[in-house]
Amino acid sequence: MASTSCDVVVIGSCNMDMTVKCKDLPIPGQTMMGDGFVTNAGGKGANQAVAAAKLGAQTQIVARVGNGMFVPRFFESYDKVNLGHDFVVRDPETPSGTALIFVDTEGENMIVVAPGANMKLSSSDLDAAKSVIEGAKVMILQLEVPLETVIYAAKMAKQNGTKVILNPAPVRTLPPELLENVDIIVANEVEVMLISGAKDVDTSTAAVVCRPLLQAGVEHVITTLGKDGAVIVSGGNATKVRGFKVDAIDTTSAGDTFVGALACALTEGVALEDATHFANAAAALSATKVGAQQSMPTRTEVDEMLARKFPA
């Protein structure tokens, strides 16, 4: 089968996000009143794919959705941003993935995911999408689908010379057969600490904390630090990339926006540090609006922010 050219292919999850705004995040045993309720298409895979597509990358998603009333809304969301979904399989016997999200007045969030059809994404689904996988410049992976499927995808990409970005969320043990096929890991501070067992990670400690991942075969590890930017660890060196301070309303999609924006920039031949700077700007903009996919910025919005903050 001939390859189908695209910039970014995302192997991952599609969820329906159910978001409640509240004054504070609840603690175990607590019942509280919320300030509003909205439903929107989400899932880490779909979010990252939408982020890349909105920024101008020709993007395809390979995923599974289930039955029920949410399915048309998934495809409507993808069509709005020209996200290709030819290889999204509809499973009539399984519910679609669902995420329950609480967001407080500071923009911090708490998320629980019921994966549904996402956990049925298989190697045979990837084989069916071989043409688009072979034609991609960058592959994005996360861990909201079966680990064996993620490993299979990474191996397919590696054999084809496609750059692989792994966002290891939700955190789990990362086996050697996955790490040796990953080029870039993107994770937030908490995820890096959980993976490494470290108690803290910043510019001064990142090189040491991330060393085991590099020794396992990963070329670069990017730790995102919210408004403080990100730290890139390559070899034995750590490079801090400045962030953007904004009036954050909802940080739910910031991490996914960062990953999609990074992939988009890398497909254009941008150096990793510059691509990270671009991704920081996109992530910051996403935090100024409520929701996930609908909060993600366009290319024009990111370019305007970069010009405004750092004029040529």
Image (spheres, grey):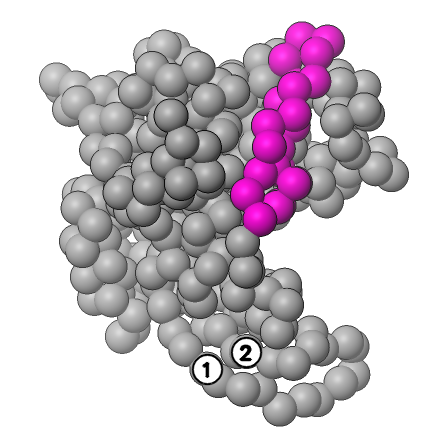
Mark 1, residue position: 37
Residue 172 coordinates in the image, percent (x, y): 67, 40
Total marks in image:
2
Rendered view: 136 above or below 281: above
Tag on residue 185?
none
Rendered view: 54 above or below 105: above
Q: Are marks 1 and 2 in contact (CB under 8 Å)?
A: yes
Q: Which residues are magenta?
A: 224-245
What amino acid type should be assigned to the residue bearing mark 2? Lys
Say which quadrant the N terminus sits in.
Answer: top left
Q: Nearer the viewer, residue 276 or 144?
A: 276
Instruction: Name which residue lies at 53% across and 78% down.
Output: 20
Query: In the figure, is residue 87 to the left or right of 159?
Result: left
Q: Residues within 10 Å of mark 1 (few under 14, many from 20)?
A: few
Mark 2, residue position: 21
Rendered view: 29 above or below 185: below
227 falls in the magenta region: yes
Query: In the figure, is residue 303 to the left or right of 280?
Result: left
Instruction: Name which residue lies at 76% across and 85% down.
Output: 30
Instruction: Name which residue lies at 45% across and 32% down.
Output: 310
